[in-house]
Amino acid sequence: MGGVGADRMAVGGAVACRRHFCDGHAVGAMRALLLNICLAAALAGSVVACARKEEAPTKSGLVTFVATVGDIRDIVPATGALMSMAGADVRASRAGVITAVLVTEGQMVRAGQVLATMEDPGRAAVEAEASANARSFSASLEEAQIALRSARLDLDRRRTLQRGGFVSAAAVETAEVETQRAQAAVDRARNQHQAAQARLMSVAAQAQTSDVRAPLDGKVTLVLAKVGQRVAPEDERPLFKTEAADTDLLLEIMIAETDIARVGPDSQVMFTVDAFPDIRNQATLESIGTAPIREGRFVSYRAVARYDNRAGVLTPGMTASVELIQADSRNVLRVPAQALSYRPPGYVAPLSDAQRKQLMKEYNNNETYVRAAADGMEYGRHIRNGTRLVFLLKDGKLEQREVRIGAQAGDYAEILSGISKGEVIVVRGADERSR
């Protein structure tokens, strides 16, 4: 098949490869990489790569590589700065005058601790009024209760006299009405008394909360409050600034646009600060931003890492020289990454009878599509298992071998198991099929 028909078959095979690779649930950037590899395999059938000095062509045209021990490193340099996990500007909760400042800059405080005491010049009058009202309504309640007791006694007396025929029923009814009125007066006085007591308690509580208190455990970083200063909640300048206890710090990292593709969620974060340039610190990467930050012609992306600062040596505001390490394996068995995708001419990914039958049905017996789908299924399985398929050259013959891989960076991949140092691996060939 040639021309347009061949191109259509190649594209169809690529779609089948992509579909069945996705069915293997590969995720993230690796998915995009491998899907593009599948597409390239179906459309082109070969991969062009730069020769390495360790690679050697054979008489058969295959380019091989002797598995050797070496380093695999991929380290992205970046800049950063340490920040506190949380901070707060502290202002007065109500208007008043500061009578005492109880903390200094740099002092550690606990949440709720008094930073400054305050006095409201008009508070004494408010407290006196609330107290007087409470006493007045208490007396009114007592008077109403006395009146109610008197009304009940009068009602009982009239009922007794009525039974003896000395008073009329109308007189008893009048006494009942007076008793009900007395009861209503008691209820009203009790409600007024409770409201006055609540007001008195509120005034007392306001007196307690007028003091300026720390909102969180941490350190006082700024003290602007002064004795005699008149303050209010709406003041623009805070009285104090506090930062959360520095047991954990955030490391803000700025990554250059040219390096962002080399950084992933599993990147290791190492950094130093100017104050202690010889001490390497490790942080845990928490997020990588997707919004570009532009400064002139330069574009960077913001990442955030968490640093355990229980030792208390580092402080917020320190600048950092950061290394984002995607791979840093030393003295490991390695092979060219291209060898992991080499397939000899005529290679067919294995399928069970049931799988082949299903694919033939799904793709209307189109062999090209079925082979592409089988390729995608096989590669998806290797991705999920952390393995790859390589081909060794032994005595002039190809030998298929499944290997387990570790770190990958640049042109090389670490081999954890499956081959040994000195074995000859096929990297590419003139007519190979490659993902």
Image: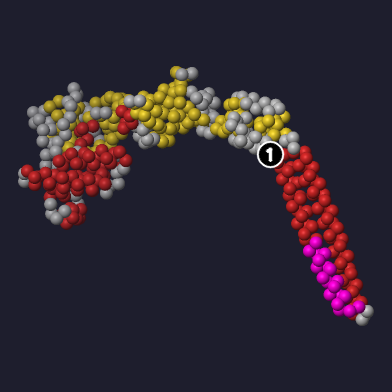
Please name whichever residue, 318 or 131, is drawn nearer the observer in this view of the structure: 131
Q: Position of residue 116 (x, y in %)?
A: 68, 31
Total tally of numbered discs in the picture: 1
The answer to whether residue 291 is above or below residue 161 is above
Residue under circle 1?
209
Q: Main secondary structure of the magenta part?
A: helix
Horizontal placement of 274 versus 360: left or right?
Answer: right
Please name whichever residue, 37 or 382, is drawn nearer the observer in this view of the structure: 37
**Which element type, helix, strand or loop, lies under badge 1?**
helix
Please name whichever residue, 341 or 45, is drawn nearer the observer in this view of the structure: 45
Q: Quadrant of the C terminus?
A: top left
Q: Position of residue 187 (x, y in %)?
A: 77, 61
> Which residues fall within the magenta stretch?
167-185
Which residue shows up at 44% across the image and 29% down it? Answer: 252
Q: Is residue 272 rendered magenta in the image?
A: no
What amino acid type should be assigned to the residue bearing mark 1? Answer: Thr
Q: Residue furthest left?
A: 2
Q: Position of residue 25 (x, y in %)?
A: 30, 46
Q: Which of the colour schemes (rainbow, by chain, secondary structure, one colour) is used?
A: secondary structure
Q: Position of residue 23 (x, y in %)?
A: 27, 49
Which residue shows up at 47% across the image and 31% down it? Answer: 250
Q: Tell me which corner region of the image, top left, top right, bottom left or bottom right, holds residue 344.
A: top left
